Amino acid sequence: MDVTNPVKDNILNWRRYNMNTRKKYSK
């Protein structure tokens, strides 16, 4: 986790979650 830049870390986490969700629900 990048403590100096939480916004960047949040964006990376959101993108990772988005990719995982897309894989899980892809048909």
Image (tube, rainbow, N blue to C red):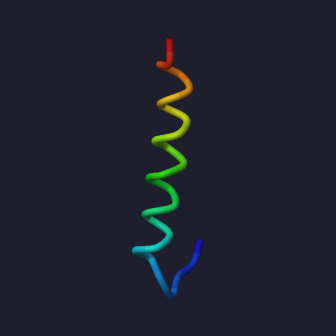
Q: Spot the residue most to the front.
A: 27
Residue 12: percent from the left, percent from the top? Answer: 51, 61
Viewport quadrant of the N terminus: bottom right
Q: Residue at x 46, y 73 (%)?
A: 8
Q: Residue at x 44, y 64 (%)?
A: 10
Q: Spot the residue most to the top.
A: 27
Residue 18 relative to residue 20: left or right? left
Please count the marks in the image. 0
Q: Residue at x 44, y 76 (%)?
A: 6
Residue 21: percent from the left, percent from the top? Answer: 48, 31
Q: Quadrant of residue 7?
A: bottom left
Q: Is residue 12 above or below residue 18?
A: below
Q: Spot the residue most to the right.
A: 1
Q: Residue at x 50, y 11 (%)?
A: 27
Q: Spot the residue most to the bottom.
A: 4
